[in-house]
Protein backbone atom coordinates (compact mmCIF):
# COMPACT_ATOMS: atom_id res chain seq x y z
CA UNK A 1 0.00 0.00 0.00
CA UNK A 2 1.23 3.51 -0.82
CA UNK A 3 1.30 6.77 1.09
CA UNK A 4 -0.28 9.13 -1.44
CA UNK A 5 -0.37 12.96 -1.57
CA UNK A 6 -2.78 14.71 -3.95
CA UNK A 7 -2.12 18.12 -5.53
CA UNK A 8 -5.28 19.31 -7.28
CA UNK A 9 -8.59 18.17 -5.84
CA UNK A 10 -11.02 18.76 -8.70
CA UNK A 11 -13.00 15.89 -10.18
CA UNK A 12 -10.03 13.65 -11.03
CA UNK A 13 -7.90 14.24 -7.90
CA UNK A 14 -10.89 13.84 -5.57
CA UNK A 15 -12.26 10.69 -7.26
CA UNK A 16 -8.82 9.01 -7.30
CA UNK A 17 -8.13 9.92 -3.67
CA UNK A 18 -11.50 8.52 -2.53
CA UNK A 19 -11.11 5.31 -4.53
CA UNK A 20 -7.50 4.72 -3.45
CA UNK A 21 -8.31 5.30 0.21
CA UNK A 22 -11.19 2.83 -0.20
CA UNK A 23 -8.63 0.25 -1.41
CA UNK A 24 -6.45 0.68 1.67
CA UNK A 25 -3.90 3.27 0.50
CA UNK A 26 -3.20 6.17 2.88
CA UNK A 27 -3.92 9.66 1.62
CA UNK A 28 -1.36 11.71 3.53
CA UNK A 29 -2.51 15.16 2.46
CA UNK A 30 -4.25 17.17 -0.24
CA UNK A 31 -4.01 20.68 -1.63
CA UNK A 32 -5.65 22.84 -4.30
CA UNK A 33 -5.33 26.34 -5.69
CA UNK A 34 -7.98 28.07 -3.58
CA UNK A 35 -8.01 25.46 -0.80
CA UNK A 36 -11.82 25.11 -0.93
CA UNK A 37 -12.11 21.77 -2.74
CA UNK A 38 -9.06 20.47 -0.84
CA UNK A 39 -10.49 21.25 2.60
CA UNK A 40 -13.81 19.59 1.66
CA UNK A 41 -11.96 16.48 0.47
CA UNK A 42 -9.60 16.45 3.48
CA UNK A 43 -12.64 16.39 5.75
CA UNK A 44 -14.10 13.39 3.84
CA UNK A 45 -10.79 11.54 3.88
CA UNK A 46 -9.70 12.54 7.38
CA UNK A 47 -6.32 13.77 6.14
CA UNK A 48 -4.45 17.10 6.29
CA UNK A 49 -5.11 19.94 3.87
CA UNK A 50 -2.14 22.09 2.89
CA UNK A 51 -2.07 25.54 1.39
CA UNK A 52 1.16 24.81 -0.53
CA UNK A 53 1.90 21.65 -2.61
CA UNK A 54 5.51 21.43 -1.33
CA UNK A 55 4.17 20.88 2.22
CA UNK A 56 2.87 17.49 1.01
CA UNK A 57 6.28 16.23 -0.11
CA UNK A 58 7.61 15.00 3.23
CA UNK A 59 4.67 12.57 3.70
CA UNK A 60 3.68 11.13 0.33
CA UNK A 61 5.83 8.51 -1.38
CA UNK A 62 3.52 8.82 -4.40
CA UNK A 63 2.37 12.30 -5.43
CA UNK A 64 -0.64 12.68 -7.74
CA UNK A 65 -0.60 15.95 -9.68
CA UNK A 66 -4.24 16.38 -10.76
CA UNK A 67 -4.20 20.06 -11.69
CA UNK A 68 -5.41 21.35 -15.07
CA UNK A 69 -2.88 20.62 -17.85
CA UNK A 70 -1.83 24.28 -18.12
CA UNK A 71 -0.72 24.29 -14.45
CA UNK A 72 1.37 21.11 -14.50
CA UNK A 73 4.68 22.58 -15.65
CA UNK A 74 4.54 25.40 -13.07
CA UNK A 75 3.53 23.08 -10.21
CA UNK A 76 6.35 20.64 -11.13
CA UNK A 77 8.86 23.53 -11.13
CA UNK A 78 7.50 24.88 -7.83
CA UNK A 79 7.86 21.45 -6.17
CA UNK A 80 11.34 20.91 -7.63
CA UNK A 81 12.55 24.35 -6.51
CA UNK A 82 11.32 23.74 -2.96
CA UNK A 83 14.29 21.39 -2.52
CA UNK A 84 11.99 18.91 -0.74
CA UNK A 85 11.71 16.24 -3.47
CA UNK A 86 13.00 12.93 -2.14
CA UNK A 87 15.08 10.38 -4.05
CA UNK A 88 12.74 7.89 -5.80
CA UNK A 89 9.60 9.82 -4.86
CA UNK A 90 7.04 8.97 -7.58
CA UNK A 91 5.06 11.69 -9.38
CA UNK A 92 2.13 11.13 -11.73
CA UNK A 93 0.03 13.51 -13.78
CA UNK A 94 -3.26 12.57 -15.47
CA UNK A 95 -3.23 14.49 -18.73
CA UNK A 96 -4.05 12.50 -21.85
CA UNK A 97 -2.36 15.02 -24.14
CA UNK A 98 0.88 15.90 -22.29
CA UNK A 99 3.87 13.57 -21.96
CA UNK A 100 5.37 12.56 -18.60
CA UNK A 101 8.38 14.81 -19.46
CA UNK A 102 6.38 17.85 -18.44
CA UNK A 103 7.39 16.75 -14.93
CA UNK A 104 11.14 16.61 -15.79
CA UNK A 105 12.14 19.26 -13.15
CA UNK A 106 11.07 16.64 -10.57
CA UNK A 107 13.14 13.94 -12.27
CA UNK A 108 16.19 16.22 -12.18
CA UNK A 109 15.76 16.29 -8.37
CA UNK A 110 15.70 12.48 -8.04
CA UNK A 111 11.98 11.88 -8.61
CA UNK A 112 10.46 9.19 -10.84
CA UNK A 113 7.82 10.45 -13.26
CA UNK A 114 4.88 9.09 -15.20
CA UNK A 115 1.56 9.99 -16.76
CA UNK A 116 -1.56 7.91 -16.12
CA UNK A 117 -4.57 8.79 -18.25
CA UNK A 118 -7.93 7.32 -17.29
CA UNK A 119 -9.95 6.98 -20.51
CA UNK A 120 -13.14 8.16 -18.86
CA UNK A 121 -15.13 11.41 -18.65
CA UNK A 122 -15.12 12.80 -15.10
CA UNK A 123 -18.30 14.89 -15.17
CA UNK A 124 -18.50 14.85 -11.34
CA UNK A 125 -16.65 13.18 -8.47
CA UNK A 126 -19.54 10.82 -7.66
CA UNK A 127 -20.10 9.84 -11.31
CA UNK A 128 -16.35 9.23 -11.74
CA UNK A 129 -16.21 7.04 -8.65
CA UNK A 130 -18.96 4.82 -10.08
CA UNK A 131 -17.84 4.89 -13.77
CA UNK A 132 -14.10 4.35 -13.41
CA UNK A 133 -14.12 0.57 -12.85
CA UNK A 134 -13.25 -1.25 -16.07
CA UNK A 135 -11.89 1.88 -17.82
CA UNK A 136 -8.65 1.82 -19.78
CA UNK A 137 -5.71 3.64 -18.13
CA UNK A 138 -2.90 4.63 -20.50
CA UNK A 139 0.54 4.81 -18.88
CA UNK A 140 3.57 6.62 -20.29
CA UNK A 141 6.78 7.48 -18.48
CA UNK A 142 9.72 6.03 -16.51
CA UNK A 143 9.92 2.27 -16.32
CA UNK A 144 10.28 2.43 -12.54
CA UNK A 145 7.06 4.49 -12.35
CA UNK A 146 5.20 1.87 -14.38
CA UNK A 147 5.28 -0.67 -11.51
CA UNK A 148 3.61 1.78 -9.14
CA UNK A 149 1.20 2.93 -11.89
CA UNK A 150 0.12 -0.63 -12.68
CA UNK A 151 -0.52 -1.35 -8.99
CA UNK A 152 -2.66 1.81 -8.74
CA UNK A 153 -4.54 0.91 -11.94
CA UNK A 154 -5.16 -2.61 -10.62
CA UNK A 155 -6.52 -1.20 -7.37
CA UNK A 156 -8.81 1.12 -9.35
CA UNK A 157 -10.03 -1.99 -11.22
CA UNK A 158 -8.88 -0.44 -14.49
CA UNK A 159 -7.25 -1.94 -17.58
CA UNK A 160 -3.59 -0.86 -18.00
CA UNK A 161 -2.24 0.18 -21.40
CA UNK A 162 1.39 1.07 -22.18
CA UNK A 163 1.54 4.17 -24.37
CA UNK A 164 4.39 5.55 -26.49
CA UNK A 165 5.09 9.24 -25.95
CA UNK A 166 4.70 10.01 -29.67
CA UNK A 167 1.22 8.42 -29.76
CA UNK A 168 -0.22 10.62 -27.02
CA UNK A 169 -1.66 13.39 -29.27
CA UNK A 170 -3.53 10.85 -31.46
CA UNK A 171 -4.63 8.82 -28.44
CA UNK A 172 -6.06 11.94 -26.82
CA UNK A 173 -7.68 13.08 -30.09
CA UNK A 174 -9.53 9.74 -30.33
CA UNK A 175 -10.77 10.14 -26.75
CA UNK A 176 -11.87 13.71 -27.46
CA UNK A 177 -13.87 12.64 -30.55
CA UNK A 178 -15.47 9.67 -28.73
CA UNK A 179 -16.50 11.67 -25.68
CA UNK A 180 -16.52 15.45 -26.19
CA UNK A 181 -17.63 15.47 -29.83
CA UNK A 182 -20.24 12.82 -29.07
CA UNK A 183 -21.67 15.30 -26.56
CA UNK A 184 -21.60 18.03 -29.23
CA UNK A 185 -23.22 15.70 -31.76
CA UNK A 186 -26.08 14.91 -29.38
CA UNK A 187 -26.39 18.62 -28.54
CA UNK A 188 -26.89 19.09 -32.30
CA UNK A 189 -29.63 16.42 -32.42
CA UNK A 190 -31.36 17.86 -29.33
CA UNK A 191 -31.27 21.37 -30.79
CA UNK A 192 -33.08 20.09 -33.93
CA UNK A 193 -35.87 18.63 -31.76
CA UNK A 194 -36.08 21.92 -29.87
CA UNK A 195 -36.90 23.62 -33.19
CA UNK A 196 -39.99 21.35 -33.21
CA UNK A 197 -41.03 22.77 -29.82
CA UNK A 198 -39.64 20.11 -27.46
CA UNK A 199 -37.89 21.09 -24.23
CA UNK A 200 -34.28 19.95 -23.79
CA UNK A 201 -35.41 17.24 -21.37
CA UNK A 202 -38.17 16.02 -23.73
CA UNK A 203 -35.65 15.84 -26.58
CA UNK A 204 -33.10 13.96 -24.44
CA UNK A 205 -35.81 11.52 -23.28
CA UNK A 206 -36.98 10.98 -26.87
CA UNK A 207 -33.48 10.31 -28.19
CA UNK A 208 -31.97 8.27 -25.32
CA UNK A 209 -33.42 4.85 -26.29
CA UNK A 210 -32.11 5.38 -29.84
CA UNK A 211 -28.70 6.46 -28.54
CA UNK A 212 -28.49 3.49 -26.15
CA UNK A 213 -29.53 1.07 -28.91
CA UNK A 214 -26.92 2.52 -31.26
CA UNK A 215 -24.16 2.27 -28.63
CA UNK A 216 -25.14 -1.35 -27.94
CA UNK A 217 -24.97 -2.06 -31.71
CA UNK A 218 -21.51 -0.46 -31.91
CA UNK A 219 -20.35 -2.55 -28.93
CA UNK A 220 -21.58 -5.83 -30.41
CA UNK A 221 -21.20 -5.24 -34.19
CA UNK A 222 -18.48 -2.58 -34.43
CA UNK A 223 -18.72 0.97 -35.87
CA UNK A 224 -19.12 -0.18 -39.49
CA UNK A 225 -21.86 -2.83 -39.26
CA UNK A 226 -23.75 -0.66 -36.74
CA UNK A 227 -24.47 1.95 -39.44
CA UNK A 228 -28.13 2.22 -40.46
CA UNK A 229 -30.18 5.04 -42.03
CA UNK A 230 -30.48 6.83 -45.38
CA UNK A 231 -26.76 6.98 -46.20
CA UNK A 232 -26.31 3.25 -45.48
CA UNK A 233 -29.35 2.56 -47.73
CA UNK A 234 -28.21 4.93 -50.49
CA UNK A 235 -31.45 6.88 -50.10
CA UNK A 236 -30.59 10.22 -51.74
CA UNK A 237 -34.18 11.56 -51.75
CA UNK A 238 -34.28 11.48 -47.95
CA UNK A 239 -30.96 13.33 -47.76
CA UNK A 240 -32.35 16.07 -50.02
CA UNK A 241 -35.35 16.47 -47.70
CA UNK A 242 -33.06 16.66 -44.65
CA UNK A 243 -30.94 19.30 -46.34
CA UNK A 244 -33.92 21.40 -47.40
CA UNK A 245 -35.23 21.34 -43.82
CA UNK A 246 -31.97 22.15 -42.05
CA UNK A 247 -30.89 24.86 -44.49
CA UNK A 248 -34.07 26.77 -43.59
CA UNK A 249 -33.18 26.56 -39.89
CA UNK A 250 -29.48 27.20 -39.44
CA UNK A 251 -26.71 27.39 -42.04
CA UNK A 252 -23.96 26.35 -39.56
CA UNK A 253 -25.88 23.22 -38.61
CA UNK A 254 -26.46 22.53 -42.31
CA UNK A 255 -22.67 22.65 -42.89
CA UNK A 256 -22.07 20.25 -40.01
CA UNK A 257 -24.76 17.89 -41.34
CA UNK A 258 -23.05 17.84 -44.76
CA UNK A 259 -19.57 17.16 -43.30
CA UNK A 260 -20.93 14.29 -41.20
CA UNK A 261 -22.94 13.01 -44.16
CA UNK A 262 -19.82 12.88 -46.36
CA UNK A 263 -17.95 10.96 -43.64
CA UNK A 264 -20.90 8.59 -43.26
CA UNK A 265 -20.71 7.78 -47.00
CA UNK A 266 -17.18 6.42 -46.33
CA UNK A 267 -18.55 4.22 -43.54
CA UNK A 268 -21.39 2.93 -45.75
CA UNK A 269 -18.92 1.99 -48.53
CA UNK A 270 -16.78 0.19 -45.93
CA UNK A 271 -19.91 -1.64 -44.76
CA UNK A 272 -20.62 -2.65 -48.35
CA UNK A 273 -24.24 -1.47 -48.15
CA UNK A 274 -23.58 1.01 -51.00
CA UNK A 275 -21.04 0.76 -53.83
CA UNK A 276 -18.75 3.46 -55.23
CA UNK A 277 -21.36 4.59 -57.80
CA UNK A 278 -24.01 5.03 -55.08
CA UNK A 279 -21.42 6.89 -53.01
CA UNK A 280 -20.69 9.27 -55.89
CA UNK A 281 -24.44 10.00 -56.30
CA UNK A 282 -24.80 10.79 -52.60
CA UNK A 283 -21.67 12.95 -52.65
CA UNK A 284 -23.14 14.89 -55.60
CA UNK A 285 -26.23 15.72 -53.53
CA UNK A 286 -24.00 17.29 -50.86
CA UNK A 287 -21.86 19.05 -53.50
CA UNK A 288 -24.95 20.53 -55.28
CA UNK A 289 -26.32 21.84 -51.99
CA UNK A 290 -22.84 23.24 -51.21
CA UNK A 291 -22.89 25.15 -54.55
CA UNK A 292 -26.41 26.46 -53.84
CA UNK A 293 -25.48 27.70 -50.36
CA UNK A 294 -22.34 29.44 -51.76
CA UNK A 295 -24.46 31.16 -54.49
CA UNK A 296 -27.06 32.35 -51.93
N1 LIG B 1 -12.14 15.74 -16.31
C1 LIG B 1 -11.91 14.66 -17.04
O1 LIG B 1 -12.84 14.07 -17.60
C2 LIG B 1 -10.50 14.12 -17.17
C3 LIG B 1 -10.34 12.82 -17.70
C4 LIG B 1 -9.06 12.30 -17.78
C5 LIG B 1 -7.96 13.07 -17.39
N2 LIG B 1 -8.15 14.35 -16.91
C6 LIG B 1 -6.96 15.11 -16.50
O2 LIG B 1 -6.96 15.20 -15.07
C7 LIG B 1 -6.32 16.42 -14.67
C8 LIG B 1 -7.24 17.19 -13.74
O3 LIG B 1 -8.43 17.52 -14.43
P1 LIG B 1 -9.80 17.85 -13.65
O4 LIG B 1 -10.89 17.71 -14.67
O5 LIG B 1 -9.87 17.10 -12.37
O6 LIG B 1 -9.59 19.41 -13.33
P2 LIG B 1 -10.45 20.32 -12.35
O7 LIG B 1 -11.73 19.65 -11.95
O8 LIG B 1 -10.50 21.67 -12.98
O9 LIG B 1 -9.55 20.42 -11.03
C9 LIG B 1 -8.28 20.97 -11.03
C10 LIG B 1 -7.79 21.06 -9.59
O10 LIG B 1 -6.45 21.58 -9.61
C11 LIG B 1 -6.34 22.62 -8.64
N3 LIG B 1 -5.29 23.52 -9.06
C12 LIG B 1 -5.28 24.37 -10.11
N4 LIG B 1 -4.10 25.02 -10.16
C13 LIG B 1 -3.36 24.56 -9.12
C14 LIG B 1 -2.07 24.88 -8.61
N5 LIG B 1 -1.29 25.77 -9.24
N6 LIG B 1 -1.64 24.24 -7.49
C15 LIG B 1 -2.43 23.33 -6.86
N7 LIG B 1 -3.67 22.99 -7.29
C16 LIG B 1 -4.13 23.61 -8.40
C17 LIG B 1 -7.73 23.24 -8.59
O11 LIG B 1 -7.88 23.94 -7.38
P3 LIG B 1 -9.29 24.61 -6.87
O12 LIG B 1 -10.20 23.44 -6.58
O13 LIG B 1 -8.90 25.33 -5.65
O14 LIG B 1 -9.75 25.47 -8.01
C18 LIG B 1 -8.61 21.98 -8.69
O15 LIG B 1 -8.75 21.39 -7.42
C19 LIG B 1 -5.98 17.16 -15.97
O16 LIG B 1 -4.64 16.89 -16.32
C20 LIG B 1 -6.93 16.53 -17.00
O17 LIG B 1 -6.41 16.60 -18.32
C21 LIG B 1 -9.39 14.88 -16.80
Image (spheres, rainbow, N blue to C red):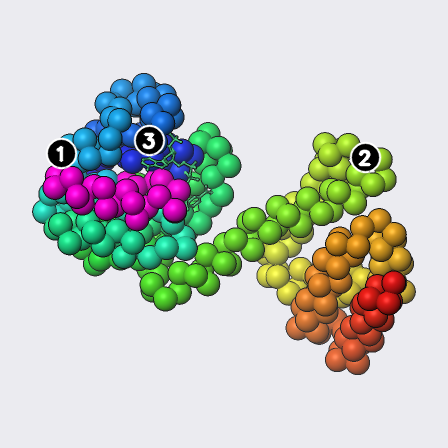
The image quadrant of residue 104 is: bottom left
Nearest to viewer (mark 3 / mark 2): 3
Task: Read off the residue under disc 1.
Answer: 58
Q: Answer above or below: position of 146 versus 269.
A: above
Left/right placement of residue 129 relative to residue 18 reads right
Q: Residue at x 88, y 52 (%)?
A: 248
Span of residues in magenta:
64-84
Q: Residue at x 40, y 65 (%)?
A: 167
Report whether the residue tagged 1 is closer than 8 Å to ligand 1: no
Sequence-first tag of 2 and 1: 1
Task: Read off the residue under disc 3.
Answer: 32
The answer for how far apart the CA atoms under marks 2 and 1 are is 57 Å
Residue 83 belongs to magenta span:
yes
Q: Secondary structure at mark 1?
A: loop
Q: Secondary structure at mark 2?
A: loop
Residue 64, visible in the rendered structure: yes
Q: Answer above or below: position of 19 versus 102.
A: above
Question: Residue 46: where, in percent of width, then height?
Answer: 27, 20
Amino acid sequence: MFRVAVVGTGVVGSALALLLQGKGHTITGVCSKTGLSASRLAERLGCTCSSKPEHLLNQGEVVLLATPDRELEGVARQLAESGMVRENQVFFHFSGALPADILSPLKERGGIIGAIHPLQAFASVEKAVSNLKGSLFAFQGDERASEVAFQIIKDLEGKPFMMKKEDKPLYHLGACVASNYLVSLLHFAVSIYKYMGMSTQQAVNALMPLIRGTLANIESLGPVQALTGPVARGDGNTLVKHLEAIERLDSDLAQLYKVLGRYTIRVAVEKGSIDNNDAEELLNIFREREDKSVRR
